[in-house]
Image: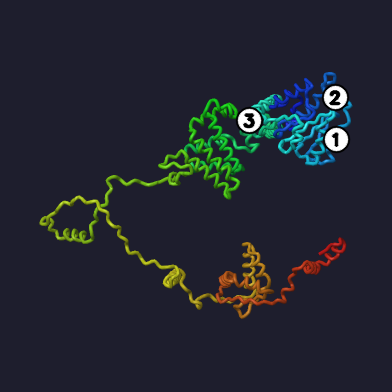
Amino acid sequence: MEPFIVSARKYRPQTFKDVVGQQAITNTLENAIANNHLAQALLFCGPRGVGKTTCARILAKKINQDGTEREDEDFAFNIFELDAASNNSVDDIRNLIEQVRIPPQVGKYKVYIIDEVHMLSQSAFNAFLKTLEEPPKHAIFILATTEKHKIIPTILSRCQIFDFKRITVKDAVEYLKFIAEEQGIQADDDALHIIAQKADGAMRDALSIFDRVVSFSGKELTRKAVAENLNVLDYETYFETTDLILENKIPELLVLFNKALTLGFDGHHFIVGLASHFRDLLVAQHPQTIALMEVSEDAKAKYSSQAQKTSNEFLIKALDLANDCDLNYKISKNQRLLVELTLMKLASLTFETEKKKLDKIIPASHFRIQDYVAAPKNYSVTEVATPQQEATVVNSTNTGNAASEKVTEPKPSKTVLEKPVIENRAKRVSGLSISSLKTKKEHQARVSPIVSKDDLPKEKFTEAEMQKYWNVYVDKLDQQGKKIMASNLHADVPRLKQETVIWIELPNDTMKKEIEREQGPLLEFLRSNLQNYTIELKISVNEATAKKFAFTPEEKYEKLREKNPALDLLRKEFDLDF
């Protein structure tokens, strides 16, 4: 099977009968050719992609066929096309006028097709006016434009105007069905309707979209595949959205809108499509107006089913809200919030409240789940015996003369509401008070008792042992990713002075400050491993030692050359820079 990318060119109309959706115009042109009543200046105007230039080419080919020539002769030498968008100057029109004077060598007429004629300049229009007013008998001008109002009235008054209309979705679907049958493709009606709606009345765009979708999906065109490839919201999304609106489910509605946004759809596109869906539901409520819907039969049945659940009052209010959102979308600072508020208002239209307002929103408490346990019906708060009464009862039992005392039955307790008794709690201590600091110190003393310095170990150690654990700590920092700190500690070899004082010399104050800031963990590591808690660290700065560090490219090269003199030979051999 041949590539589908060329199907648009293959199915380009060759005769007036092949032109889709413009039968009235093509019939008029055929009758004018047959009766020799064709005007010498024609103006084809209409939207893009409806067949203006195609009809001009078919007409140019048809008027030179008088029955004696071959039908496959296209008279290409008699057809001249000029793109006014790129040839809009006076000189271009003058060249055209010079060509008009020469009669045709074959056939009766020379046809001049000027596309996008509204792009001509004012001076070019004036230069073309005289020729268009009194053209030679052998010349026919066909002007094509998408913006008729930009053409000067003196040109319009001298042309026979043909207004091309947009191709209906039904005609586009029928022609796409014909192409699908010719190519052996199984296409759903809903899929072809999406393509026709996306083309917006242009058959050329419909063919191009059809090529792209077939290249993506293969021989089977489904509604889901077409919607995914064209990046359009399926009408099933709007059916689900309307159901959630009618059921007043605001949370689920917002989640559905967020899902549409995550798929890459614009909020404006969503709300405009929803407004069109409400319009289709309003149309589907009456059997006579349902024919106005440009959808498939299955979709019409779905619209009719959902239209029975809605009322005219709801749909009119919903259309009003959606239209306001559409108008205010571009000027809104928070466009997503605008759409979400509109959806919440739509879901609140059918919510029963005391006062119904158009902008009323269901309160959030309506969707809140309240989990509580109801109190039992026989629940009551009774009087509680005081401590004095309890003591009296205890004393009466200890006497042992139970028979001599009168025992009265307890009266039924009355239901009373007692005031809650607030117990005297311990005084709370502020975290910033002096007493809190004292309490904290006492707690730390209990958890980790303070050990006297005299009781700490003071084992003697050598300089070699100190340097060994120093390097172990530096390697530990390097493994933890603290490269800068490890490099600073490696800047000098530590020396031992006065038995417990470790001394290092650094080239600048920055390295000194970095080590002093982090010397706590270092001293703790050395003291614990060397078993001497009197170790101290002394750091001095000697700027003269900074010279041994190479910073510039020249200094780096000199240091490398000192280590390997052959490097200088390599540089000279290949004429390299350092």
How many marks the image carries: the answer is 3
Q: Quadrant of residue 35?
A: top right
The reply, left or right, for residue 129 in relation to residue 23 is right
Q: Say what secondary structure mark 3 lies in.
A: helix
Mark 2: amino acid = Lys
Give how far apart the Cα atoms at labels 3 and 2 are: 44 Å
Q: Nearer the viewer, mark 3 or mark 2?
A: 2
Can I make out residue 19 in this image? yes
Q: Relative to 561, does residue 135 appear above or below in the rendering? A: above
Q: Earlier in the sequence, mark 1 or mark 3?
A: 1
Q: Is residue 10 left or right of residue 278?
A: right
Q: Which comes sooner in the sequence, label 3 or label 2? A: 2
Write down the residue under mark 3: 193
Disc 2 and disc 1: Cα gap in Å?
18 Å
User: Label 3: few (<14), some or many (≥20) within 10 Å?
Assistant: many
Secondary structure state at the residue bearing disc 2:
loop
The residue type indicated by label 3 comes to His
**For mark 1, what is the residue?**
97
* Secondary structure type for disc 1: helix
Q: Quadrant of the C terminus?
A: bottom right
Q: Considering depth in this image, is 445 or 354 the residue closer to the camera?
A: 354
Mark 2 crowd level (few <14, some 14–19, many ≥20, 10 Å Cα): some
- Residue 12 image offset from top left, x and y in percent: 75, 28
Using the image, tell me which numbered label, if any, was put on residue 108.
Answer: 2
Task: Using the image, determine if residue 145 lies above or below residue 59.
Answer: below
